[in-house]
Amino acid sequence: MRTATVVTVTAATALLWVPSAGASTVTNRDGKDHKVSVIAGGTAKDHVLRPSAALEGICKTGCVIRLNDSTKDEYELQGSDVVSIEDGYLYYDGPPASAVPKADDADQPFVPGAQ
């Protein structure tokens, strides 16, 4: 009985440490703080993103990101976009590392979402 409990607790703990699949990340590469508003499902949540800090696990089903309360600086993100703030603007950095094909898959076509 004790072995089963330890295995169950270990498996549950491992699941908690898995990064959010299908979620976006915003990294601040500027030398100053930026206010980042995440608007999803009709609600907005504000964050202050310090230099070199990152918001991870946001926009799992897509959202709008607004920088510094400016309606002119709104960006639509999909569930797995990786973006950064540079010089006050949001730039697309690429897909998450898990979506990039491995070197041994070079002869295989890349199919988004396929594993």
Image (cartoon, rainbow, N blue to C red):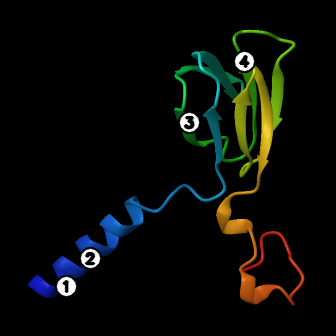
**Is 1 left or right of 10, judged from the image as shown?**
left
Q: Position of residue 10 (x, y in %)?
A: 26, 73
Q: Inspect the image, locate mark 2, and give the three-letter code of the amino acid beneath it.
A: Thr
Circle 1 — which element? helix
Q: Mark on residue 67?
A: 4
Amino acid type at mark 3 = Leu
Q: Quadrant of the N terminus?
A: bottom left
Q: Check disc 1 and give the amino acid type.
A: Ala
How far is mark 4 from mark 1, CA to CA?
49 Å
In contact (CB < 8 Å): disc 4 and disc 1: no
Q: Which residue is mark 3?
A: 55
77 vs 102, nearest the viewer: 102
Q: Tell me how far mark 2 sits from mark 3, CA to CA.
A: 30 Å
In the figure, 84 relative to 60: above or below? above
8 vs 16: above or below = below
Of labels 1 and 3, earlier in sequence is 1
Q: What's the mark number on residue 4? A: 1
Left or right of residue 41, residue 73 in this image: right
Q: Position of residue 72 (x, y in %)?
A: 87, 13
Query: Do the CB atoms of the residues marked 2 and 3 lie less than 8 Å apart?
Result: no
Tell me if I can see residue 41 in this picture: no
* First of labels 2, 3 by sequence position: 2
Estimate the spatial distance between the alpha carbons at disc 4 and disc 3, rounded to whole Å: 13 Å
**What amino acid is found at the position of numbered circle 4 in the picture?**
Leu
Earlier-in-chain disc, 4 versus 1 = 1
Figure quadrant of residue 32: top right
Gap between marks 4 and 2, in whole Å? 43 Å
Measure how far apart labels 1 and 3 are at the Cα level.
Answer: 36 Å
Rounded to the nearest whole Å, what is the CA distance between mark 1 and mark 2? 6 Å
Regarding mark 2 in the picture, which secondary structure is present there? helix
Which mark lies nearer to you, 1 or 3? 3
- Residue 52 screen position, x and y as percent: 54, 32
